[in-house]
Image: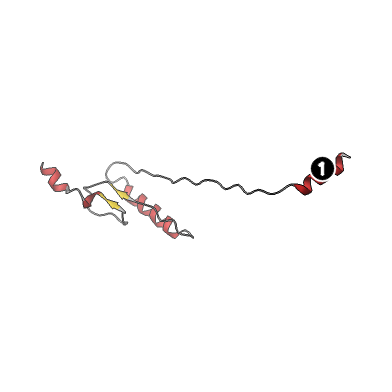
Amino acid sequence: MSSSYSASAESTSTTTTVTEKKFPICIITIGMAGAGKSTFVQRINSHLHSLEPTSPPYILNLDPAVAFVPYEANIDIRDTVNYSEVMKQ
């Protein structure tokens, strides 16, 4: 009797799909001048754009004194803060 019960239990079981919630990932890159922060962010940006399907990151540049960044920032503090004016004050 137990074997027929387990066989019927196996035949009536259903497969359920569990969907995992994906939370956004935040990477804050800080370090001394020349440590490679811009290179690191540029490489992560390049990698995320190369994925299929693409998963472009949302990038913020919060360094008003940087002269050049090798990637396009979605928000750039240099658009609102004039570094040379701040240094004069």
Which quarter of the picture shows residue 3?
top right
| Residue ID at (28%, 41%) | 32
Q: Please give the count of numbered marks on the rendered protein.
A: 1
**Along the horizontal axis of the image, is 9 left or right of 22?**
right
Rendered location of residue 57, percent (x, y): 39, 53
Q: Quadrant of the N terminus?
A: top right
Q: What amino acid is found at the position of numbered circle 1 in the picture?
A: Ser
Q: Quadrant of the C terminus?
A: top left
Rendered location of residue 18, percent (x, y): 60, 47
Q: Nearer the viewer, residue 74 or 28?
A: 74
Residue 55 vs 35, above or below: the answer is: below
Residue 35 vs 69, above or below: the answer is: above
Residue furthest left as drawn: 88
**Along the horizontal axis of the image, is 76 left or right of 41?**
left
**Label 1 belongs to which residue?**
6
Q: Nearer the viewer, residue 34 or 67?
A: 67
Residue furthest front as drawn: 12
Rendered location of residue 72, percent (x, y): 31, 57
Residue furthest right as drawn: 1
Residue density around tag 1, few if under 14, some if 14–19, many if 20 or more, within 10 Å: few
Query: How was this image coloured?
Result: secondary structure
Q: Nearer the viewer, residue 13 or 32?
A: 13
Q: Secondary structure at mark 1?
A: helix
